[in-house]
Image (tube, rainbow, N blue to C red):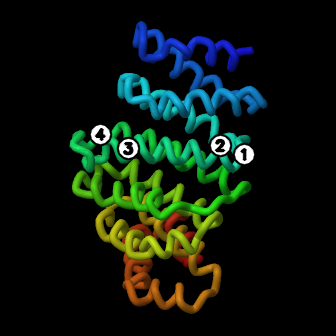
Amino acid sequence: GFCQGVESALEGLGYSDDGFYLRLLRTATMLISRSQPTSETTVLCQIVVQKVANRSVPVSLRVEACKLVWAITSTCQITDGSHLRDAMEKVIEFMKEFNGERGQPLNLKVQEAAGGCLVGIAACLRHNPISLDHQTIDVFMGSIYKTMPLRDQAAKFTSLVLTAMWSLCFVDEPALLRAGLIVIVMDVMSAYTNSAEIQEKSCAVLAKLASSENIQITLSIVETDGITHIVRALGAFPSNKGVTSQASRA
């Protein structure tokens, strides 16, 4: 099948013509995003994740491999918790490698591809929850702050991570709260006041947290000026259905 052909071809990734593998990965991503998931895609995902983690593979190809993992996980077909944990750890490691923390310059393309992967993996985890490691959470939350000075350039990445965090609230909300989720959402809302998409997704996270009706969570949202941020979002985008819907739920 197609997936088996891609698997065989990927054995030489990083050791021969980069142009060929770039086209292969992009074609695979396009076809998988348009087709029904099969059991073969689960195996392919495991193989591609290893390529994301392989530092001998050119960064441009690792980014495309990341996008392929994003396409596969977006189907929510990966159900094995250990596979999902492994994928998350390797994607997070790739994100950390290029978030400006380890001597490498901040690479926004890497951050966006890894952020997209997190969206897909988090969606899978909603149906197959695992406990979240605090170091893993710290990396993607930290990357939000590292990219924040870029403002509009980093808006896509920030939006992706917010989407992932919303899904992860269904997986291990206490771990996210311990890592400072509420404060991070407030900081994001302050930094991206001109982005309706980010305001909407921030309000969606707050709405999810508030839905638990936990008095401590509600107090934390109030104490960190959550009400003020929500009202500002409504004032800035009164005709945006996404913002008004999520803000009213929050």
Q: Which residue is mark 2?
A: 83
Going by the image, does 77 lie left or right of 10?
right
Query: The C terminus lies in which quarter of the figure?
Result: bottom right
State which mark lies toward you, 3 or 2.
Answer: 2
Query: The N terminus lies in which quarter of the figure?
Result: top right
Q: Which residue is mark 4?
A: 107
Query: On residue 111, which mark appears?
Result: 3
Cα separation, mark 1 vs mark 2, equals: 5 Å
In the rendered structure, which disc, 2 or 4, sits on the residue that comes first in sequence? 2
* Amino acid at pointer 4: Asn
Decide: marks 1, 2 in contact (CB < 8 A)? yes
* Amino acid at pointer 3: Gln
The x, y position of residue 177, in whole percent, is 50, 75
The x, y position of residue 2, in whole percent, is 70, 16
**SS for callout 3:** helix
Residue at x 44% of width, y 71% of height = 179
State which mark lies toward you, 1 or 4.
Answer: 1
Decide: marks 4, 3 in contact (CB < 8 A)? yes
Using a 10 Å C-alpha cutoff, classify the residue at mark 2 as few (fewer than 14 neighbours), some (14 to 19) or many (20 or more): some
Using a 10 Å C-alpha cutoff, classify the residue at mark 4 as few (fewer than 14 neighbours), some (14 to 19) or many (20 or more): some
Cα separation, mark 1 vs mark 3, equals: 25 Å
Can residue 244 be seen at all in this image of the molecule? no
Q: Which residue is mark 1?
A: 80
Decide: marks 2, 4 in contact (CB < 8 A)? no
Cα separation, mark 4 vs mark 3, equals: 6 Å
**SS for callout 4:** loop
